[in-house]
Image: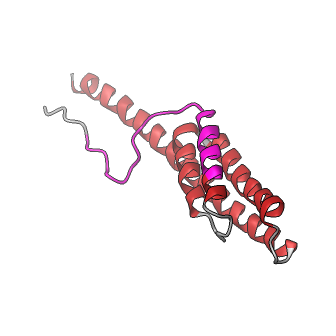
Amino acid sequence: MNKEPLARPWWLLPPGRLHPTWWAGVAALLLWLDYATGLDTQFPSLYFIPVTLAAWYSGRWPALALAVALPLVHIVFLLTLKRPAGSLVTLVGMTVVRGAIIIVTALWFARLSKHERDLHRHVQTLEGLLPICAF
């Protein structure tokens, strides 16, 4: 019998885990990039990348912490450094919308990651039972 493992889909992130504190450094780097490139972006899509990776490699809570902290620090930068000409209500509203979208992304990828890990464990268990049943 051919015992070749199934090929991992190209679109699925590689397996593994990272310590949640690693994402603090990633967040600091992104916030520095946000500050250095100008605070004029209305929707910093760069925040999706670390939140998604944190959800996949460290779980729900580190991703949620990152998803909440990044938009909040962005608004603090805007209020203290740039002094936007627009309404404060609009600025806070956009930050809440931005944060909500990033939080949904974090929860979705954390759930997807957990499901993939559970599925992998289940397949390994079944592959372990197969030789016993065949005997």
Residue drawn at point x = 31 percent, y = 31 percent: 127
- Name the outermost residue toward the right: 88
Compared to residue 127, the image places residue 94 above or below, namely below
Name the colouring of the figure.
secondary structure
Magenta stretch contains residue 7: yes
Relative to the observer, which residue lies in front, 29 or 113?
A: 29
Looking at the rendered image, the quarter that the N terminus falls into is top left
Magenta stretch contains residue 11: yes
In the displayed structure image, the side of residue 77 where residue 18 appears, left or right: left
Q: Quadrant of residue 108?
A: bottom right
Relative to the observer, which residue lies in front, 6 or 103?
A: 103
Residue drawn at point x = 67 percent, y = 47 percent: 66
Q: List x then y, in percent, for residue 106.
A: 61, 52
Q: Quadrant of residue 119?
A: top left
Q: List x then y, in percent, for residue 71.
A: 72, 57
In the displayed structure image, the side of residue 113 where residue 47 appears, left or right: right
- Name the outermost residue toward the left: 1
> How many callouts does the rendering have?
0
Residue drawn at point x = 26 percent, y = 44 percent: 7
Looking at the rendered image, the quarter that the C terminus falls into is top left
Residue drawn at point x = 57 percent, y = 30 percent: 19
Task: Give the magenta-colored segment's residue range.
Answer: 6-32
Relative to the observer, which residue lies in front, 88 or 36?
A: 36
Compared to residue 68, the image places residue 4 above or below, namely above
In the displayed structure image, the side of residue 131 where residue 60 appears, left or right: right
In the displayed structure image, the side of residue 7 where residue 90 appears, left or right: right
